[in-house]
Image (cartoon, rainbow, N blue to C red):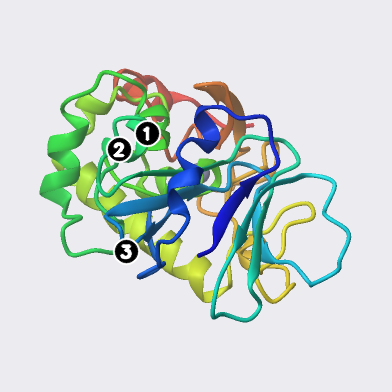
């Protein structure tokens, strides 16, 4: 590329962009929610879209987008201007030495890709055994497995019958196997439906994903559990709204008490 132009105030979110000049983008890869573009000079362009970031071509002569943060000027490609627009500035767009993620601890600690063969029940159980965090918060950390966000964590924990506040290390082997299966099923179904778009998000083709129509529990507190018919409840885990079924997803110590509780 000819160069990367920084239009945002400089800072660690946009570090090293000046090094991109003269390097060729050799591939486009992904790990978790990070986009990885290895560059010909041994560097790597790393992008994370955050909540609202978008990477999109920019038409020649078009007025710059109000929230334009970075513009890549590409040679020998059409369209040859690629922009990173990020209204809320949670995203990152930076250049590091290839594979050196010291500045990106979340990426460095990322667990296996959920649909990879490497993501086995044994590996998930071993990862869970390392933490006392609530299992949902630990899933959101991306360390046991990559790519599970708030919606998919709620859906997978409900499918597996695991209470979101269960300490990760107390998830039993059979539950870990169910959870691993549930994570894969939820993600595969979401991919088939082109994702879960809430609010004004769109696919790259401008369409809304349809998985939102298939959600069993996310955002449905007070509604009936699709499995047992009891009311779904909401709590907050790691500052994230969480919906679960208190009957289908009992906490380990509450198991007996829940079984005796009669429903109105
Ligand atoms: Zn239920």
Side of 183 relative to 230 (left or right): left
Residue sitting farthest toward the right: 63
- Say which quarter of the image contains residue 140: top left
Q: Mark 3 points at which residue?
A: 40
Side of 201 relative to 62 (left or right): left
Mark 3 CB in 8 Å range of ligand 1? no
Q: How crowded is mark 1: few (under 14 residues within 10 Å), some or many (20 or more)?
A: few
Q: Name the residue under label 1.
A: 104
x and y, in percent, of residue 247 in the image? 47, 35
- The structure residue drawn at horizontal position 74% and vertical position 72%, both measured from the top left corner, is 206
Numbered badge on residue 101 = 2
Depth check: 38 or 258 in front?
A: 38
Residue 172 seen in render: no
Label 2 near label 3: C-beta < 8 Å? no
- The structure residue drawn at horizontal position 49% and vertical position 49%, both measured from the top left corner, is 47
Label 2 near label 1: C-beta < 8 Å? yes
**Mark 2: secondary structure:** loop
Q: Quadrant of the C terminus?
A: top right
- The structure residue drawn at horizontal position 71% and vertical position 64%, both measured from the top left corner, is 202
Estimate the spatial distance between the alpha carbons at disc 3 and disc 1, rounded to whole Å. 21 Å
Q: Nearer the viewer, mark 3 or mark 2?
A: 3
Q: Which of marks 3 and 1 is nearer the N terminus?
A: 3
Estimate the spatial distance between the alpha carbons at disc 1 and disc 2, rounded to whole Å. 5 Å
x and y, in percent, of residue 240 in the image? 57, 28
x and y, in percent, of residue 36 in the image? 39, 56
**Mark 3: secondary structure:** loop
Q: Which of marks 3 and 2 is nearer the N terminus?
A: 3
């Amino acid at each position: 590329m000819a160069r990367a132009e920084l239009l945002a105030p400089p800072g660690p979110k946009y570090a090293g962009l000046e090094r991109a000049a003269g390097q060729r983008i050799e591939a486009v890869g992904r790990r978790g929610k990070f986009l990885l573009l290895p560059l010909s000079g041994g560097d790597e362009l790393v992008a994370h879209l955050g909540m609202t970031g978008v990477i999109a071509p920019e038409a020649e002569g078009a007025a710059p987008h109000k929230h334009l943060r970075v513009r890549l000027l590409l040679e020998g490609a059409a369209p040859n201007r690629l922009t990173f627009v990020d209204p809320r500035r949670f995203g990152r767009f930076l250049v590091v030495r290839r594979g050196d993620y010291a500045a990106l601890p979340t990426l460095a600690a990322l667990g296996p890709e959920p649909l990879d063969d490497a993501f086995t029940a044994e590996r998930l159980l071993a990862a869970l055994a390392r933490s006392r965090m609530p299992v949902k918060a630990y899933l959101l950390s991306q360390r046991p497995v990559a790519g599970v966000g708030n919606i998919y964590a709620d859906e997978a924990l409900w499918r597996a019958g695991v209470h979101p506040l269960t300490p990760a290390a107390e998830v039993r082997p059979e539950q870990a196997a169910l959870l691993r299966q549930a994570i894969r099923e939820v993600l595969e179904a979401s991919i088939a439906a082109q994702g879960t778009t809430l609010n004004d998000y769109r696919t790259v083709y401008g369409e809304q994903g349809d998985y939102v129509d298939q959600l069993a529990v996310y955002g449905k507190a007070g509604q009936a559990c699709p499995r047992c018919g009891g009311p779904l409840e909401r709590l907050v885990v790691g500052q994230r709204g969480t919906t679960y079924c208190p009957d289908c997803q009992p906490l380990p110590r509450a198991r007996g008490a829940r079984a005796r509780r009669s429903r109105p």
